[in-house]
Image: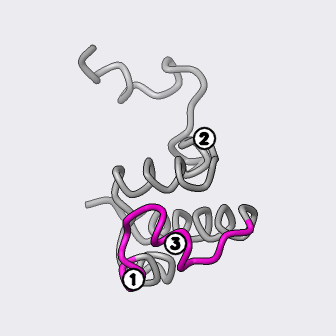
C-alpha cells in the first residue's frame, strides 16, 4: 500500500468538508440527501475512514460539484502521457 494513503484520506476529507461548507448545506442535510449515514459521514470527514469512489460520486451529485473536485491534485493529470498508469486502463 502506498505511503500516500493517509495524505489522500486527509485531503479527501478536507475537500468534501469544503464542498459541504460552500454548498450551504448542513452535514445532516448532506447525510440525508446522499444516503450516507450521519455517523459514517462524520467519521470520513474526520479522516478516520476513507471515502470510497461511490461515496465521492454521490456527494458530488448531492453537493452540485464536479466529481473532479474530490480528486487529489497528485492524481490529476490533464495529459495521459504524463501519467503512464492511465495508459494501462482498458477501454
Q: What's the mark number on residue 66?
A: 2
In the picture shown, does residue 78 fall above or below 46?
above
In the image as oriented, which residue stretches furthest toward the top? 91
- The label on residue 32 is none
Counting residues from the N terminus, which is met first, the one under dot 2 or under dot 1?
1
Residue 9 lies left or right of residue 76; in this view the side is left
Marks 2 and 1, how far apart in space? 24 Å
The answer to which image quadrant residue 27 occupies is: bottom right
Query: Dot 2, crowdedness within 10 Å: few (<14), some or many (≥20)?
Result: few
Mark 2, mark 1: which one is toward the viewer? 2
Labelled pair 1, 3 in contact (Cβ < 8 Å): no
Q: Is residue 65 left or right of residue 36?
A: right
Numbered disc 1: secondary structure: loop
Which residue is depicted at the point 27% across and 14% down?
91
Of circles 2 and 3, the one toward us is 2
For marks 2 and 3 on the same chain, the one whose residue lies earlier in the sequence = 3
Label 3 secondary element: helix
Residue 72 position in % (x across, y down): 55, 52
Viewer-side residue, 31 vs 40: 31
Q: Main secondary structure of the magenta part?
A: helix
Q: Position of residue 81 (x, y in %)?
A: 50, 17
- The mark that comes first in sequence, 1 or 3, is 3
- The residue labelled by disc 3 is 10
The residue under label 1 is: 48
Residue 88: give x, y in percent of width and height: 28, 22
Real-space Cα distance between discs 2 and 3? 19 Å
Q: Which residues are magenta?
A: 24-40
> At 53% from the left edge and 79% from the top edge, which residue is drawn?
28
Amino acid at each position: 500500500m502506498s505511503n500516500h494513503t493517509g495524505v489522500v484520506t486527509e485531503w479527501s476529507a478536507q475537500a468534501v468538508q469544503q464542498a459541504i461548507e460552500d454548498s450551504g448545506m448542513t452535514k445532516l442535510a448532506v447525510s440525508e440527501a446522499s444516503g450516507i449515514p450521519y455517523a459514517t459521514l462524520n467519521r470520513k470527514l474526520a479522516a478516520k475512514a476513507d471515502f470510497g469512489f461511490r461515496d465521492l460520486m454521490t456527494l458530488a451529485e448531492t453537493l452540485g460539484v464536479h466529481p473532479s473536485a474530490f480528486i487529489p491534485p497528485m492524481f490529476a493529470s490533464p495529459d495521459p502521457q504524463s501519467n503512464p498508469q492511465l495508459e494501462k486502463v482498458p477501454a
